[in-house]
């Protein structure tokens, strides 16, 4: 097991009706900005619950943060934060709203040009961000309990990551009841995103970190188990609760401690969102199978372990089991109605692989993924395999 440090300061408040506890967590002296997305919270009752909990507080609101949070929109919120002397932010939404708020947390106390935070990967250290919390409305990204964010700037076709230990939410409220109003398309996205987060931290080399392996496999199996229930029309609270908690546990840092992780699927996937606007999770389902086929030699032992332990594949050689594992994974994404080829999303896919290769070279991303095995020319080939 590799050496590691682990600190996750986010308090989780989990369960039915818990949104009212906002008032227990934020001091009455704070000047709050509530931030949200395109308006789903106004029709599903979440906004009303937040408003009731903020009775007696001094608060303002900022709506309209789009999916794949947009830099230009966030700059408008930054202006309000400065003009109104905001001291605390409350993100009410999915990964996009929470990520947008993390960017604002970093930018509020940053002296230079805000874009530099993304362009130069400037980290926000502990105690340096503007304090914030979240009410999660869409389980998927794990943003509610981690310190990373991904911000888009459509004007220049960029989607870049950022973060730092100062960007954990102080608390996050996870009420599975919010899942009732989520369209099935977004549920499928959430399951796929969380599933791939586990894969990115697990599907590398065989490890002696037995506990981390078992944690990862149990999250994958739980997601597989609850997926059919989540895709049914009828709402099942316990499945929703397991779905929500699995998504958080998939990316709160725990399972990646002491192991080698990958993240090339995300690195390449973000380019597909930047170029075509494809939903984040769907870009992962497009890239993952090709990535595992292309890097088969490096990953086959772990792929075989995945097939055995997660899918009960008992027959065959290591190579046969590993291939079966990739097939099972792809079939799982497809069972959620998620297409796994780029050409199923756009007719305009020719040349995408070359563009991604060039973008990686321009950004100096010369060796990404597990042990840096994915060079720009490999990324190109992986994308071509995903056409
Ligand atoms: O904007 P509104 O009207 O609220 O609608 C949203 C949005 O259209 C809707 N929605 C959310 N909760 C709902 C709901 N609709 C009905 N009922 C509810 N309860 O769902 C749509 C998608 O929301 P969004 O926040 O964009 O989805 P998601 O949570 O999947 O976030 C995606 C973003 O997170 C980034 C992605 O790259 C992408 O930009 N990621 C962040 C990560 C992190 N911070 O750790 C890691 C991930 O790998 C990912 O990269
Ligand atoms: Zn993701």
Image (cartoon, rainbow, N blue to C red):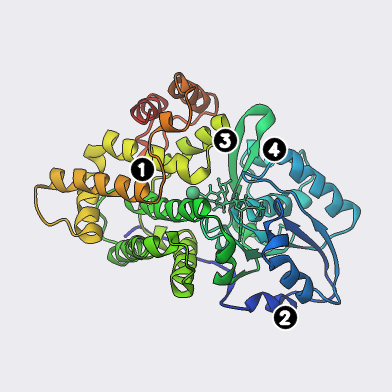
Q: Which residue is mark 2?
A: 24
Q: Secondary structure at mark 1?
A: helix
For mark 3, does the 10 Å Cα neighbourhood hold few (<14), some (14 to 19), or many (20 or more) residues?
some
Task: Using the image, tell me which numbered label, if any, was put on residue 116.
Answer: 4
Task: Compare marks 1 and 3 and give the one earlier in the sequence.
Answer: 3
Q: Secondary structure at mark 2?
A: helix
Task: Compare marks 4 and 2 and give the one earlier in the sequence.
Answer: 2
For mark 4, does the 10 Å Cα neighbourhood hold few (<14), some (14 to 19), or many (20 or more) residues?
few
The yes-or-no answer for disc 4 within 8 Å of ligand 1 is: no
Q: Which residue is mark 1?
A: 370
Relative vertical location of residue 191 with respect to residue 6 in this rendering, above or below: above
Q: CA distance from mark 4 to mark 2?
A: 36 Å
Of badges 1 and 3, the one in the foreground is 3
Q: Residue 175 location in percent, x, y?
A: 58, 72
Residue at x 28%, y 36% (from the top left corner): 295
For this view, does 198 lie left or right of residue 12?
Answer: left
For mark 2, does the 10 Å Cα neighbourhood hold few (<14), some (14 to 19), or many (20 or more) residues?
few
Q: Which residue is mark 3?
A: 277
The reply to whether callout 4 and callout 2 are in contact (CB within 8 Å) is no
Please state, as top left, top right, bottom left or bottom right, where the N terminus lies in the image.
Answer: bottom left
For mark 1, does the 10 Å Cα neighbourhood hold few (<14), some (14 to 19), or many (20 or more) residues?
many
Q: Residue 33 location in percent, x, y?
A: 80, 61
Residue at x 16%, y 55% (from the top left corner): 313
For this view, does 82 lie left or right of residue 328?
Answer: right
Task: Compare marks 2 and 3 and give the one earlier in the sequence.
Answer: 2
């Amino acid at each position: 097991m590799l050496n590691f440090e682990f600190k996750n300061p986010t308090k989780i408040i989990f369960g039915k009706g818990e949104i009212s506890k906002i008032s227990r967590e934020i001091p009455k002296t704070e000047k709050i900005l509530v931030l949200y997305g395109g308006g789903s919270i106004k029709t599903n009752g979440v906004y009303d619950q937040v408003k009731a909990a903020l009775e007696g507080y001094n608060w303002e609101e900022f709506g309209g943060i789009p999916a794949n949070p947009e830099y230009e929109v966030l700059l408008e919120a930054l202006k309000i934060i400065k003009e109104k002397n905001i001291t605390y932010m409350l993100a009410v939404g999915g990964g996009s709203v929470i990520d947008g708020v993390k960017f604002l947390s970093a930018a509020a106390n940053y002296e230079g040009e805000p874009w530099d935070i993304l362009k130069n990967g400037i980290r926000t250290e502990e105690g340096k961000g503007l304090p914030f919390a979240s009410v999660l409305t869409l389980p998927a990204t794990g943003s509610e309990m981690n310190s990373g964010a991904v911000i888009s700037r459509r004007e220049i076709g960029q989607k870049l990551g950022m973060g730092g230990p100062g960007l954990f939410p102080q608390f996050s409220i996870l009420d599975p009841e919010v899942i009732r109003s989520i369209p099935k398309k977004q549920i499928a996205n959430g399951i796929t995103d969380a599933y791939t987060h586990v894969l990115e931290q697990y599907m590398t080399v065989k490890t002696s970190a037995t506990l981390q392996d078992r944690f990862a496999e149990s999250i994958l199996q739980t997601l597989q188990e609850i997926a059919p229930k989540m895709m049914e029309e009828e709402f099942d609270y316990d499945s929703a609760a397991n779905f929500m908690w699995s998504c958080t546990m998939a990316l709160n840092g725990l399972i990646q401690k002491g192991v080698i992780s990958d993240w090339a699927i995300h690195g390449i996937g973000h380019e597909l969102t930047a170029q075509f606007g494809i939903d984040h999770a769907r870009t992962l389902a497009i890239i993952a199978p090709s990535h595992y086929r292309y890097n088969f030699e490096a990953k086959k032992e772990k792929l075989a372990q995945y097939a055995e332990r997660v899918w009960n594949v008992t027959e065959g050689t290591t190579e046969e089991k590993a291939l079966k594992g990739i097939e099972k994974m792809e079939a799982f994404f497809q069972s959620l109605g998620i297409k796994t080829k780029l050409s199923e999303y756009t007719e305009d896919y020719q040349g995408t692989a070359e563009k991604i290769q060039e973008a990686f070279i321009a950004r100096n991303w010369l060796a990404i993924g597990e042990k840096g095995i994915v060079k720009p020319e490999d990324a190109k080939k992986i994308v071509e395999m995903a056409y």
